[in-house]
Image: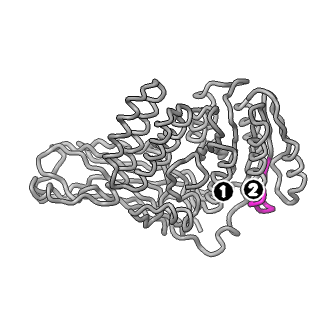
Amino acid sequence: MNAHLSLCTTVILTARRSGLAAGADQVVDVLVRIQAPDAPAGHVAERPPQALALVIDRSGSMAGRPLAEARRCAEYVIGQLRPTDAVSLVQFDNRVQRLWPAVPLSDAAPLRAALASVHAGGNTDLHGGWREGADTLADVQGHGLKRVILLSDGQANEGLTDADAIAAQCADWAARGITTSTYGLGNDFNEGLMVAMARAGGGNAYYGDSAEDLMEPFQQELELLGNLCLRELHLAADVPDGVVVEMVNDLPKAERGWRLPDLAWGTEAWAVLRLKVAAGALPAHGGLLSLLRVNVESVSLEGEPVQLERAGLALPVMGAAAHAALADDELVSRRLAELSAAAVLTRMRAAVAQGDWDGVDRLLAQAERQFAGNEWLAAVLRAMHSMADERSRERLMKESLYASGKLGSRLAEKDELAVYSPAMEWSEKPAYLRRKPSQGKGSA
């Protein structure tokens, strides 16, 4: 299977324009696409056992419907797993309690009984709860995926509370094979911390406006975990003298290059590299410049290294008029538009944090004009505009952060259509491939 993956997973490089202008400094944007093969028959049955730690905030603010919905989501997770998968259960407020160890789910009844015992309590030792969840997975045998699933609606106000220190621990555990996904609920959780934990921890970050919105992101996570084919994708780029490369996406830096999202069957992970090419690096008019070579390393579900075939890009050098006549590649332009929109949302979040609502309105107006031809981005901006009109500070802070993250680090369909239809997104696609207008809502 691993040899099949290394041979059938394709790395595609596409420049925004298919040529270089002779005698000029210039910027070349290159879309890198790592495409997984379609799923083989029986891939779910063949996947190695997974180990999940369900870590649930039971602080006082979770009382009532939020905690009931959290338990319902945990029930959903339990119901989707196989008897050979391991699940642990941890609850936390100012105290941390391991309610169930990470053991195979041969009989789910005792675990469900432990889940039913989770009731609201006091303050929020978020780090302690997460760490206990990671500890439950440390002794699980095998190399299948191991993930902490953390749900909280509040601030870390007990134990370790420094966001950078917590995120660093998430990164350390990810290096040991135990990753972290986070689920924030409502308006009062610390979105900066929750996103940082998932980003450093090699997992995913989700949030719900309301308790009822939690189910869709849980479905998204479970569908994704059930369809993964490669984990821990790392992209490295080599360029010749006179060329400087930078990553346009907001992706985590790795020891060499950048970390991409885990790859599911039939999808593509992607990134845009921006190459700054000095005129002195160009060959003569009519020549060909080997501009870029990329290397992609990953890990199979069984924990074995998978090296993908290296890919390169060479472009011809042409006169200024011929270069100016080149058309921009449509897909590269669309992905660049998503990254530009993500940058706008990041600036808008900063303006909201400063209480600069006039600045927010200006950014939204400019973005609506800039992205008017892109139906998905237009839908995202309409959702933002509604929150801005209501001056919903906390909600807009959260939505702008999660939406910008989605735009800059999402899996895509291999042949994703330019047209955006909410009905099509929700009726024909896996949850992890949906282009949602609002990340905090459970439906389009």
Q: x, y (%) of residue 15?
A: 29, 56
The quadrant the N terminus occupies is: bottom right
Q: Which residue is mark 1?
A: 219
Judge whether residue 238 can be spotted in this image.
Answer: no
Between 388 and 411, which is closer to the camera in this rendering?
A: 388
Q: State whether residue 396 is above or below residue 231.
A: above
Q: Which residue is mark 2?
A: 76
Residue type at the position of mark 1: Gln
- The residue sitting at the front extreme is 390
Residue stretch in magenta: 78-88
Q: x, y (%) of residue 16?
A: 28, 55
Between 216 and 388, which is closer to the camera in this rendering?
A: 388
Q: State whether residue 197 is above or below residue 29.
A: above
Residue located at (62% from left, 75% from top): 41
Colouring of the image: one colour
Helix, strand or loop for disc 2? helix
Disc tally is: 2
Judge whether residue 418 can be spotted in this image.
Answer: yes
Proximity of marks 2 and 1: CB atoms separated by less than 8 Å: yes
Which tag, 2 or 1, sits closer to the chain's start?
2
* 139 relative position to 200: left or right: right
Residue located at (48% from left, 42% from top): 386
Disc 2 and disc 1: Cα gap in Å? Answer: 8 Å
Q: x, y (%) of residue 141?
A: 76, 52
Residue type at the position of mark 2: Tyr
* 267 relative position to 285: left or right: right
Q: State whether residue 386 is above or below residue 47.
A: above
* 323 relative position to 373: left or right: left
Q: State whether residue 389 is above or below residue 215.
A: above
Helix, strand or loop for disc 1? helix
Q: Is residue 264 magenta?
A: no
